Image (cartoon, rainbow, N blue to C red):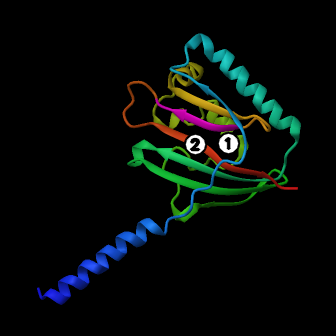
């Protein structure tokens, strides 16, 4: 191979690498306060108390009567080779009117149908557990074994972070995080 051709190929490859890393979407930072509850692991006796906490936070959300909002969600799925994705969602009058994956990179498995605040409460209650084989007769116990951390928005009550990692299940770790939320008037 001639030297000019080799040099040109090296330059093209370097430009591709720099372009792929330098042109990624900017990260959106959190814009609201949260409270965090860390669980390691949640004992079965604490599961009822935890479910009551989720119920309390969901009641706070419902009492506010927010029907229109914009939310950006960040997802992590370990079994998809550590896939990190983001979804941008707009809800108006309690109807999802827009949902798209940032950079055309969508959740692969567990979070394909997680778009709204109601979906976040479902995840906090363990709705994603059956998706990776943890569907036992006692879903609350499965949730107690698998839930590693959860945070709630102090103003609105919705879950801002949920992390799941079941013992003795390989590569099923996953999480969802709210990185931006805005009420639409």
The x and y percentages for residue 51 are: 68, 22
Give 47 or 182, whichever is nearer the viewer: 182
Density class for disc 1 (Cα within 10 Å; few <14, some 14-19, many ≥20) is some
The x and y percentages for residue 32 are: 73, 44
Q: Which mark is residue 86?
A: none
Helix, strand or loop status at disc 2: strand
Residue that protrudes farthest toward the left in the picture? 1
Quarter assignment of residue 28:
bottom right
Give 14 or 100, whichever is nearer the viewer: 14
Give 161 or 90, whichever is nearer the viewer: 161
Q: Which mark is residue 176?
A: 2
State whether residue 17 is above or below residue 93: below
State whether residue 131 is above or below residue 5: above
What is the magenta range? 159-165
Give 18 or 121, whichever is nearer the viewer: 18
153 with respect to 10 (left or right):
right
Q: Nearer the viewer, mark 1 or mark 2?
A: 2
Q: Which residue is mark 1?
A: 119
């Amino acid at each position: 191979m001639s030297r000019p051709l080799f040099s040109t190929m090296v330059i093209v490859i370097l430009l591709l690498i720099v372009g792929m890393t330098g042109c990624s979407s900017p990260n959106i930072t959190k814009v609201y306060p949260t409270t965090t509850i860390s669980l390691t692991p949640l004992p079965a006796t604490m599961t009822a108390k935890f479910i009551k906490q989720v119920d309390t936070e969901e009641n706070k959300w419902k009492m506010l009567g927010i029907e229109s909002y914009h939310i950006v969600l960040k997802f992590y799925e370990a079994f998809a080779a550590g896939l990190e994705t983001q979804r941008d969602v707009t809800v108006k009058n309690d109807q999802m009117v827009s949902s798209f994956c940032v950079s055309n990179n969508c959740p692969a498995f567990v979070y394909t149908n997680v778009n709204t605040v109601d979906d976040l409460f479902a995840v906090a209650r363990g709705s994603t557990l059956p998706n990776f084989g943890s569907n036992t007769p006692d879903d609350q116990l499965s949730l107690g074994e698998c839930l590693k951390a959860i945070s709630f928005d102090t103003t609105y009550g919705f879950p801002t972070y949920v992390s799941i990692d079941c013992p003795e299940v390989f590569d099923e770790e996953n999480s969802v995080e709210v990185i931006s939320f805005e009420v639409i008037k």
